[in-house]
Amino acid sequence: MSVAQEFEAANAKYAGGFTKGSLPLPPARKVAVVACMDARLDTARALGLEEGDAHVIRNAGGRVTDALRSIVISQQLLGTREIVIVHHTDCGMLTFSDETIRGKIKSDLKQNADHIAFLPFNDLKQSVIDDIQILKDSPLVLDVPITGYLYEVETGKIVKVGSS
Amino acid sequence: MSVAQEFEAANAKYAGGFTKGSLPLPPARKVAVVACMDARLDTARALGLEEGDAHVIRNAGGRVTDALRSIVISQQLLGTREIVIVHHTDCGMLTFSDETIRGKIKSDLKQNADHIAFLPFNDLKQSVIDDIQILKDSPLVLDVPITGYLYEVETGKIVKVGSS
């Protein structure tokens, strides 16, 4: 059985008890979360999100550079007015460089990925601070409160790293 | 109180009952989910995901073009071998065009966003089919099973639209 089929079975249970069919499109808590795609981070459970509460933007590393299109849509069309960034301990982005992944792609896939910035980092706290600053410096992002956290995959805790 | 502070309070409860502190970095179910950032979609609850199961990549519309960096990292460095795409009914991406959002940014922010492809669509099912095809055509993406769904925000159900 594919994982997709397992998702269908799990979803039948979820939909069977579903009571949230009339929520509006704009997020109720007017916040956009930018978090890493890491499997160990369940953004809803870890932050106390219910359906309808928040935009959740996730990518490798939780990098804001790769989230800019979504943040602009979130703010300009759907009214969010706060941003929360969540990176985490033991992140895969600490384990490689642009050179190593480009080399692997060249060797394994026979493809050139030199045009892709994979956005790895070697300092977790700095990656959060950098991403707050990138948003503050972007003329396309509104001047809203931004808070950055590190999620500890070992403890389930978020630890505040910085804010604007 | 900022939403970030509310997140800290909710997280203290989550961390207080946390028992999953020794999960490995690679996703246990070897799957990457690409879903819309929409507030009404809780990917973990709707698909039956537990901490450690799956990479969750989310952006405005759940568009794969904007998820390519993350998918390549997920496959090349963390071993995922299946992709599930989830778009949804009543999506904000149906409500605008590149021209309208660029015009709003020009008018409200006095900025030029002509260089950003915001990736809106006007046909929900087609957007899923298009995204499956984009992944199949990408030389940077492995030939793995890809399944695309529409999540119904009205019912909580996922409806299969296509697969590769």
Image (cartoon, coloured by chain):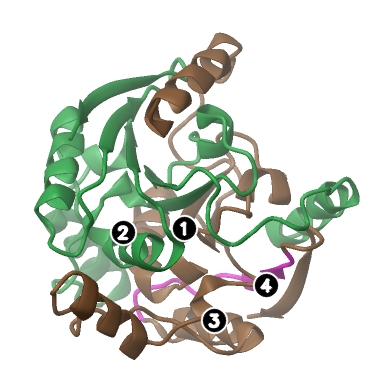
Chain colours: A green, B brown
Chain letter behind tag 1: B
**Dot label at residue A9:** none
Element at label 4: loop
**Dot label at residue B58:** 1
Disc 4 and disc 2: Cα gap in Å? 22 Å
**Dot label at residue B89:** 4
In the rendered image, the residue lying farthest to the top is B16
Answer with left or right where residue B151 lies relative to residue A132: right
Disc 3 and disc 4: Cα gap in Å? 9 Å
Answer with left or right where residue A51 lies relative to residue A9: left
For residue A100, above or below residue B135? above
Disc 4 and disc 1: Cα gap in Å? 16 Å
**Dot label at residue B94:** 3
Which mark lies nearer to you, 4 or 2?
Answer: 4
Residue labelled with disc 2: A67
Q: Residues within 10 Å of mark 2 (few under 14, many from 20)?
A: many
Q: Is residue B30 visible?
A: yes
* Residue displayed at 32% across by 46% down: A62
Disc 3 and disc 1: Cα gap in Å? 17 Å
Q: Is residue B156 magenta?
A: no
The span shown in magenta is B139-152
Q: On the image, which quarter does residue B134 sit in?
A: bottom left
Chain letter behind tag 3: B
